Image (cartoon, rainbow, N blue to C red):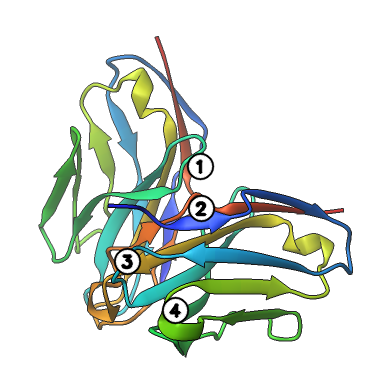
Amino acid sequence: EAGVAQSPRYKIIEKRQSVAFWCNPISGHATLYWYQQILGQGPKLLIQFQNNGVVDDSQLPKDRFSAERLKGVDSTLKIQPAKLEDSAVYLCASSLDWETSYEQYFGPGTRLTVT
Amino acid sequence: GNSVTQMEGPVTLSEEAFLTINCTYTATGYPSLFWYVQYPGEGLQLLLKATKADDKGSNKGFEATYRKETTSFHLEKGSVQVSDSAVYFCALSSSSGNTPLVFGKGTRLSVIA
């Protein structure tokens, strides 16, 4: 079974530029999550989708971050404009459905460096 | 709100040594508890879980027991190997469905031959 795919793996941008990350969850997984993992900290949930609807985006900085999951499969996370403090690893995860949200499968992450 | 506190790293051990990584939590109700592991260059993987008090989760020689009286879920392994070198995250999920995982800050383990 293929795992969660993310791209790119690494990205370096200057502050005030925009960037987008892509995630393809495990086939058949209805629930998709985006996390931000700052160096030395645990992952922090940014947004959770159930199919193509947003379940929880309470910790998403909506003035600069946006995410979508069209057709309930792939998802993109965008930052515009980026700030220095956005430097982090962005993790995508998926689970079969919301009832098994504890059993999440994570992608390798995208490491973002903002200079 | 819910939170997880785990011991600061890094932890460096010799091969075959005994490992303990402490984890305590704060939560309302009866959360489910997890240990995730992140090997170098890879994504987070679920290592083990326990969903109710006194449950013991185990996998790959690692164990953790859900202790409600001490609000703890310490990770242990009797004899570590070099291949266990990774970052270990303790996490919890509220007892109700559809709630996000809350992670600790992670503990880096290095095992030397």
Estimate the spatial distance between the alpha carbons at disc 2 and disc 1, rounded to whole Å: 8 Å
Residue appearing at x 37%, y 19% in the figure: B82
What number is the disc on residue B105? 2
In the image, taking residue A64 as reference, residue B17 lies left or right, namely left
Estimate the spatial distance between the alpha carbons at disc 4 and disc 2, rounded to whole Å: 16 Å
Which is nearer the eye, B92 or A106? A106
On the same chain: label 2 and label 3?
Answer: no
Q: Tell me, yes or no, whether the two marked residues, 4 and 2, touch with CB atoms within 8 Å.
A: no
Residue at the spot of label 3 = A27
Give the image location of residue B103, x and y in percent. 44, 60
Q: Relative to A55, is A106 above or below? A: above
Estimate the spatial distance between the alpha carbons at disc 1 and disc 4, rounded to whole Å: 21 Å
Give the image location of residue A90, x and y in percent. 59, 60
Pair 2/3: label in front = 3
**Secondary structure under badge 1?**
loop
> Which chain does the numbered disc 1 sit on?
B
Residue at the spot of label 1 = B8
**Secondary structure under badge 3?**
loop
On the same chain: label 3 and label 4?
Answer: no
